[in-house]
Amino acid sequence: MTTNPIDPVKLDKLGEVAIKVGLQLAEGQDLIITAPMTAAPLVRRITEHAYKAGAGLVTTIYSDEEATLMRYKYANDASFDRAAGWLYSGMAEAYKNNAARLAISGDNPMMLACQDPTKVSRANRANSAAYRPALELITGFDINWNIVSYPTLAWAKLVFPNDSDDVAVGKLADAIFAASRVDQPDPIAAWKEHNANLKKRWTWLNEKSFASLHYTGPGTDLTVGLADGHRWKGGASEAKNGVTCNPNIPTEEVFTTPHRERVDGYVAATKPLSHNGSLIEEMQGRFENGRLVELKAAKGQDVFNKVLDTDEGARRLGEVALVPHSSPISASGILFFNTLYDENASCHIAQGQCYADCFIDGKNLSQEQIFAQGGNKSLIHIDWMIGSDKVDIDGVHADGTTEPVMRKGEWASA
C-alpha cells in the first residue's frame, strides 16, 4: 500500500486559499480554470471551494503534455503559425462578462527542451497574438485573477532529481505549501498579515516617488527609470470589477512600471531563467535608452534572443520588482525552474508588457495614455532575476539626490 506524498489536508487548504484569498470569488461569479491534466486533484479542490463560495459556473480547460509533444513530432510545418483563436476569443468574452480567471501551473518546465527552438518560437508568437484580447483584460486588471501551483511528477523530478518519485513529489508539495502559507494554522489570517507588510513597503515607495532606481553589484550597474505617474503595488489589489484579489500565490514582491525609454546600463542575472523548455543561464544584458541592445548567456542565448525578437516591445521593460534576499522562497534554497516561484526569491525585471494598474488612476487610463506615460506594449512578459545579497539599490529623486532602498539584498529601512 502506497501513501499519498501530497498532504490532502494542505492541498484542500490551498484550494480554499486560491478561492478566498487569491480570487476572493464573488457570489454568482463564473470561474475559468486552466490546468495540466496532472493537476486534476487540485482542480477538484478548487472547484469544490468555488461552488461553496457561491460560484455561478466553473469551467476547466485542461492541457496535456503528451498531446503537446505530439504536435512537435507529427504536425505539418504550417501548424506552428496557428493558434486556437476561437478559444481565446471565448475566454475574452467570458472575462468581459466578469468571469474570474485561475491558472494552475505545474507543467514540466523542460517539456519543450528537445524540440526545434524555431518551431517553439513560432508557436509561442502565434499563441501570444491569439491570446492578446484575453490577456489585455488580465494585464489591465479588469477582472480578479490568480495563479497557484500543483506538484506534478515531471516538475518534481526536475527540482529534486536524486530522489525517488514519491519523495520528490512530497518535497515539492511541501515547498509549494510553505510558500503559499497553507502549512500554517490559519492560512487566511497569515495572508492578511503578509499583505499588510507588503502594503507598508509599497506605501513607502509611493511616498518617495523616485524617478529611477540604481542597481549596483557584480556585473551590474543599471539605472531603471520609472514611468511617469507610476505607482508601486504588491500583494492584494482591487480589480476594475471591484473585487480585491491576490493575483500570485505565492508572492513576496512589490512592483511597478519602468519607463520603456529610460533604462540604461548593464546587468547580470543572479538566477537561471526557465522559459519554454529551455534553461537560460548566466544572462548578461546591456540597455541603451530603454532597449536591451545586447543579451549574452552561457546557455540558452539563442533561445532567449529569439523571444526578444517577438516585437518591438519585447526588448523593453514592463515591470521592475523588489524582493528581499531573505524571502522565504529564497531562504528555501530551492531552484524551482518556475518563474512564479523563482521571481519571488529575488529582485527582478520583466521584458515586455506592462501592467496598467501600476499607474496612478491606472484603471481609468486608456492604453494610449499608459503608453504616453512610458508604459510598454508587447506580446510577451518574461521575468528574469537580478537581485542577490551582493546587490545594492538606490532610489534616485528627480533632482538627482539618492537614498538607499536595499543594501546587500535587504530593505534599507525598517
Image (cartoon, rainbow, N blue to C red):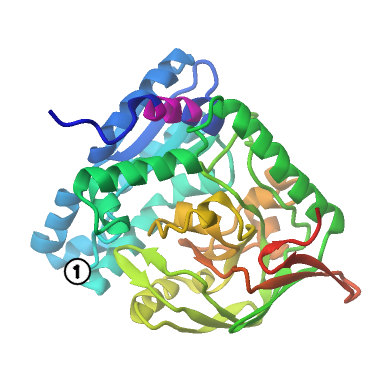
Q: Residue drawn at (34%, 45%), measured in percent from left and top?
A: 171
Horizontal arrangement in the rendering, residue 123 relative to residue 232 (left or right): left
Q: Which residue is mark 1?
A: 114
**Does residue 264 sit above or below 4 in this rendering?**
below
> What is the quadrant of residue 69 in the picture?
bottom left
| Dot 1 amino acid type | Cys
Q: Is residue 252 magenta?
A: no
Tell me the residue at 41%/16% (across/down): 51
In this picture, which residue range is highlighted in magenta?
10-17
Q: Main secondary structure of the magenta part?
A: helix
Q: Is residue 253 above or below residue 18?
A: below
Task: From the viewer's perspective, tell me whether residue 351 is left or right of residue 411.
Answer: left
The answer to whether 321 is drawn above or below residue 267 in the figure is: above
Q: Which residue is at 46% across, 52% downward?
A: 340
| Frontmost residue, 145 versus 14 | 14
The image shows residue 121 at horizontal and vertical percentages of 31, 68
Residue 215 in the image: state x and y as whole percent.
69, 75
Visible in this render: residue 133? yes
Where in the figure is residue 190, as x and y percent of width and height? 61, 32
Nearer to the camera, 390 or 78: 390
What secondary structure is found at the residue carrying circle 1?
loop
Where 3 falls versus 158 (above or below)?
Answer: above
Q: Residue 113's image quarter?
A: bottom left
- Looking at the image, residue 259 sits to the left or right of residue 63; the answer is right
11 is within the stretch colored magenta: yes
